[in-house]
Image (tube, grey):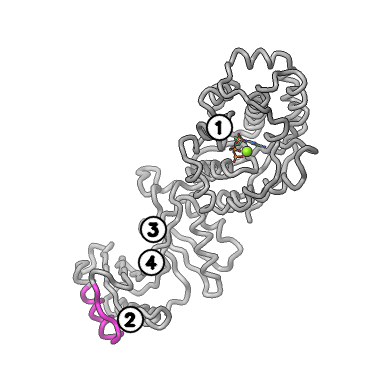
Amino acid sequence: MNEQNIFIVRCGEVALKGMNKPYFERMLVDRIRSNVKGLGNVDVKRQEGLIFVRADKDVDTDILVRQIAKVFGVASISPAVEAPSNLDDIGEEAVKYMMNLIETKGVKTFKVEAKRADKNFPVKSPDIGRIIGAKVLIGCKVLKVDVHNPDVLLYVDVRADRSYIYQDKIAGFGGLPLGTNGKGMVLLSGGIDSPVAAWMMAKRGMVIEAVHFHSYPYTSQRAQEKVEDLARIVASYCGNFKMHVVNLLPIQEQIVQNCPEEETTILVRRFMMRIAERIAENNKAMMLITGENLGQVASQTAEALVVTDNVVKMPVMRPLIAMDKIDIMDKAQEIGTFETSIQPYEDCCTVFLPKHPTTKPKLARIEESESKLDVEGLVAAAVAAEEIVQIRQK
Ligand code: ATP
Ligand code: MG
């Protein structure tokens, strides 16, 4: 019986990184370590192109696996048992492994899939499979081999010193380790889309920081708490981050008083972008991220996006741009933000919502409307009054 629980962790794309592979693997190991911190005695090590996690028996394995699966860059995880690399010991462990599955899961059939990572091992892979299969049949009398549709596909991975026996692979999200792709400033609302957008960019290795706009007292304290809840769920994947909270109300009031009603939304959006860019610059983020999606609402028509974009120099990442809403909602379910996102709290965008927002804004017109406002003064005042909330992962 192994003294610790062992998990084999496979990296997805990290494995394709050529010369940079050791760097990506080190980052991945660091991220796994920090995600399992506090769960007990857990060791995370790179070994022969894989990552091995070994945990004391008192560590909750369900939580451990969940925490590892949340690390971007992890393709899959297999709970495994190990044995010294000789066929007798491997056979003995395989029998114990299958006995346990017979007792706990009522398994009746199996097939061995053997792989020899150590090419110096004297027996070839198909023969290892046959020999271990025979040992299991002798050791577990109730089992039969089924090569087409086995209850258990038993993997035997023979390596130089130790060999590993495992069954299923638990899927991770893939992607790249956090911190390998700069920092982005996400405009985080309380909706369904922007948390998913943040998650998708973080999945590609980007460190996240957030800006949230409110229109207090038109929007409530509870609405902001909802956004903080969402941010904490995002942080459970991408670590703790800062959320800059900005009151947009003074700007909205100026717009409503001085500009055509149908332009309110697009004008507000341009201010959001300006403020987010300023905060991004102040915090060394190199891109903005939004949950915008082509055609979803009036402010997200092609024309509106062009006019919104025009106001910032920084690249604006819109990872959801071409997704259907139903797929975004599925993603939100999968990552665990959906239930929080659909709680019915007001957003600053719904305050002063025009009855007939312009869907094809013209840049020159919008700039003319803005000329009636002290744009720089309003942006500077909003940024100066920002509050910072530290988001800690759940
Ligand atoms: P979401 O589900 O993300 O709220 P949405 O479909 O409601 O998106 P809009 O309200 O038009 O779309 O917002 C588009 C994007 O603008 C959001 O995805 C988000 O990135 C940003 N945004 C909107 N409202 C806010 C806010 N209150 N604070 C920060 N960013 C916001
Ligand atoms: Mg919204």
Query: Which residue is rendered at x = 41% and y = 65% of the image?
Result: 78
In the rendered image, the quadrant that contains the N terminus is bottom left
- Indicate which disc residue 168 carries: 4
Q: Amino acid at mark 2?
A: Val
Q: Alpha carbon of mark 1 to alpha carbon of mark 4: how far?
A: 39 Å
Query: Counting residues from the N terminus, which is met first, the one under dot 1 or under dot 3?
Result: 3
Secondary structure type for disc 2: helix
Q: Residues within 10 Å of mark 4 (few under 14, many from 20)?
A: some
| Pair 1/3: label in front | 1
Check disc 1 and report the residue beneath it: 287
Would you call the spot at circle 2 few (<14 residues within 10 Å), some (14-19), or many (20 or more)?
many
Residue marked by disc 2: 95
Q: Is residue 135 magenta?
A: yes
Q: Residues within 10 Å of mark 1 (few under 14, many from 20)?
A: many
Q: Which residue is mark 3?
A: 50
The x and y percentages for residue 101 are 39, 78
Q: Secondary structure at mark 4?
A: loop
Quarter of image, ligand 2 = top right
Q: Is residue 247 above or below residue 177?
A: above
Q: CA distance from mark 1 to mark 3?
A: 33 Å
- Sequence-wise, the earlier of marks 4 and 2 is 2
